[in-house]
């Protein structure tokens, strides 16, 4: 099993939205590295920290898991979508997504400032200066360290 951190703006798609839907496609990703993580590395059952970004208090809001492996993101074919890509075709899609399933909402968000203050997390891409990727791998040690914070 692998571990991941996926960012979403809560006013667009929050942990509460996922909880109400239970399962959702993680569409609209238009960064090649993030796409490659979903397309090539994310597998059924992998656990995901659901991170609220671009908000008043950014941080980890809960946990989801991969419920469907990589498949073409349908928004790339929809000319009315903000994520439409005129270079993508059904025969040669450019963008891929996974489906995620709600696992748990944390009682309180584990804030970015808290994450930055923990020595064991100093190599995590999320806390690195200039790191803005929407999907990042998380090591098992980092995952366990963060899990230990959720009830503190």
Image (cartoon, helix red, strand yellow):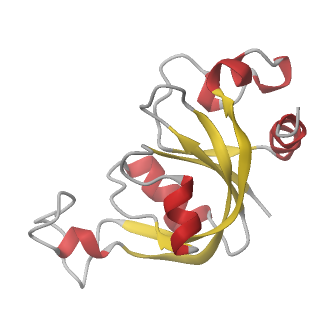
Task: Give the vertical position of 142 relative to 19 (above or below).
Answer: above
Q: Position of residue 151 (x, y in %)?
A: 87, 39
In this rendering, position of residue 39 left or right of residue 73: right
At x 74% / y 20%, what residue is drawn? 122
Q: Position of residue 150 (x, y in %)?
A: 82, 39
In this rendering, position of residue 86 left or right of residue 21: left
Task: Please tell me which residue lies in front, 77 or 49.
Answer: 49
At x 36% / y 51%, what residue is drawn? 12
At x 10% / y 66%, what residue is drawn? 86
Q: Quadrant of the N terminus?
A: bottom right
Task: Give the vertical position of 17 relative to 101 (above or below).
Answer: above
Name the residue at the bottom extreme. Answer: 91
Task: Give the vertical position of 117 relative to 120 (above or below).
Answer: above
Q: Position of residue 71 (x, y in %)?
A: 44, 78
Task: Give the vertical position of 14 relative to 133 (above or below).
Answer: below
Task: Please tell me which residue lies in front, 147 or 30.
Answer: 147
Q: Quadrant of the C terminus?
A: top right
Q: Position of residue 98 (x, y in %)?
A: 51, 70
Location of residue 121 by image quarter: top right
**Total count of labels:** 0
In this rendering, position of residue 144 left or right of residue 115: right
At x 66% / y 27%, what residue is drawn? 111
Task: Please tell me which residue lies in front, 33 or 133.
Answer: 133
In this rendering, position of residue 98 left or right of residue 85: right
Task: Please tell me which residue lies in front, 119 or 106.
Answer: 106
């Amino acid at each position: 099993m692998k571990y991941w951190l996926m960012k979403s703006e809560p006013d667009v798609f929050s942990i509460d939205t996922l909880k109400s839907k239970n399962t959702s496609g993680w569409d609209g990703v238009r960064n090649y590295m993030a796409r490659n993580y979903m397309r090539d590395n994310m597998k059924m059952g992998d656990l995901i920290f659901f991170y609220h970004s671009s908000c008043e208090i950014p941080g980890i809001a809960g946990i989801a898991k991969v419920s469907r492996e990589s498949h073409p993101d349908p928004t790339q074919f929809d000319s009315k979508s903000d994520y439409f890509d005129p270079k993508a075709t059904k025969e040669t899609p450019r963008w891929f997504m996974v489906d995620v399933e709600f696992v748990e909402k944390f009682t309180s968000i584990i804030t970015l400032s808290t994450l930055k203050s923990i020595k064991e997390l100093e190599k995590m891409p999320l806390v690195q200066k200039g790191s803005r990727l929407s999907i990042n791998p998380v090591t098992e040690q980092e995952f366990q360290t963060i899990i230990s914070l959720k009830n503190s």
